Amino acid sequence: MAKINSNYLKLAAGYLFPEIARRVNAFTSENPDAAAKLIRCGIGDVTEPLPESVRGAMHAAIDEMGTPEGFHGYGPEQGYGFLREAIAKNIYNDRGINISDDEIFVSDGSKCDSANILDIFGEGNTIAVTDPVYPVYVDTNVMVGNTGDAGNNGGYEGLVYLECNATNGFVPAIPSFPVDIIYLCYPNNPTGTVATRDELTAWVTYAKKHGSVILYDAAYSAFIQGENIPKSIYEIEGARECAIEFRSFSKDGGFTGTRCAYTVVPKDLMGKTDDGKDQSLHSLWARRQSTKFNGVSYVVQRGAEALFSDQGKAEVSKLISGYMENAKLLTDACTALGLDVFGGKDAPYVWVRCPEGVSSWEMFDKMLNEAQVVITPGSGFGAAGEGYFRISAFNSKEKVEDVCKRIAALA
Ligand SMILES: *Cc1c(COP(=O)(O)O)cnc(C)c1O
């Protein structure tokens, strides 16, 4: 008999989106008329069409593929040089950050990379995540056996949960003990908040002191509006020696369905072998990718490259301003209702405190029943998310304006 990976059986607690779907389905079958008015502000997916510059580059790449000279078979596992160079230049070097193109690994997604990265780390690491948290970091650690069972509050034994709340601005306090791996995501999903330069500096200092690795998810970096908010962990001195950065074209370029992202593993970054020697993580990740991954399609990488053209930059900037205007409208609508609102300034998520005494799921039901708006209950992202809900700004302006009217009518 084939034995299964029984770690997967610990995952029963991962019920957030199925439970949302269950409640929405129950509502729509009981209220077919109201159901037609339903607006989904739940899942973090973009809604606006793929930029013209991207489509043009992809069309041209397809035509190239139809010629003997322009045909591309397997590409380099780490990504084509043209895309890695464009990323190194536009995202890092032009902003004064020292990252070279061969430290960039192009992939089919940050979700996949932030999961796959566990391949190059050994057993027995102490792993810290924030609470609330993007569930992928937690579930992938469960899958590889880095945790015990789920406890009563939905957390897993063996993981360190760093509480994020209104008091600490949703950036966790530095632990008083060492951890080996820390997941940080800023701008944050789900809270939409950012980490300041001082806060990130404190994390880099801590990581260097303890030899920890920071897994920094900057998927929403392009949404940052604030002048002095770091867009990359590598803006912090010393981060090349302690951090891996995940970036994606999903949210800024509208690539959630097209699939292209990248991970930066600096050559200065070391882990420890079992006998206590330094080992480059860059060479391990290069080995991992070339063995288990065969690259992103040529057509898609040409599309991603086009995001760095003048036209592409203008289109991205327009997409982002549209979503950020939505976030502002949603923020204002919730504030007018007398609710405390966080995030929404440098990220497409608005994180709202429920009225006194109302739980996240009670708020979910109220918004569904009384406004036909689907939000995400904060408690689904961890125990510390209880008493909050998330509204996504990924929607058309018309729908957001409609949502705001319905929120106002709740008063
Ligand atoms: C959307 C998102 C990503 C991007 O994932 P892809 O696989 O690149 O689409 C990464 N991290 C977080 C926290 C996200 O919300």
Image (tube, rainbow, N blue to C red):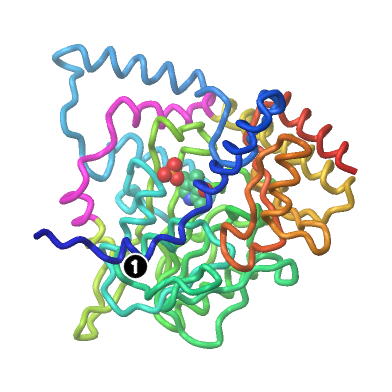
Q: Main secondary structure of the magenta part?
A: helix
Whether ligand 1 has any atom under 8 Å from the Cβ at mark 1 is answered as no
Residue at image x 66%, y 35%?
A: 323
Amino acid type at circle 1 is Asp
Residue at image x 55%, y 87%?
A: 176
As for residue 294 lying within the magenta part, the answer is yes
Residue 6 is situated, as x and y percent measured from the top left of the image, at 26, 65
In this view, the residue in front, 296 or 148, is 148
Say which quarter of the image contains residue 133: bottom right
Residue 28 is situated, as x and y percent measured from the top left of the image, at 62, 32
As for residue 373 lying within the magenta part, the answer is no
Say which quarter of the image contains residue 127: bottom left
Residue 279 is situated, as x and y percent measured from the top left of the image, at 24, 73
Say which quarter of the image contains residue 353: bottom right
Q: Which residues are magenta?
A: 286-312
Quarter placement of the C terminus? top right
* Mark 1 residue element: loop
Q: Is residue 254 left or right of residue 4?
A: right
The vertical placement of 168 against 377, above or below, is below
Residue 332 visible: yes
Q: Is residue 149 left or right of residue 391?
A: left
Q: Residues within 10 Å of mark 1 (few under 14, many from 20)?
A: some
Total numbered circles? 1
Q: Which residue is mark 1?
A: 268
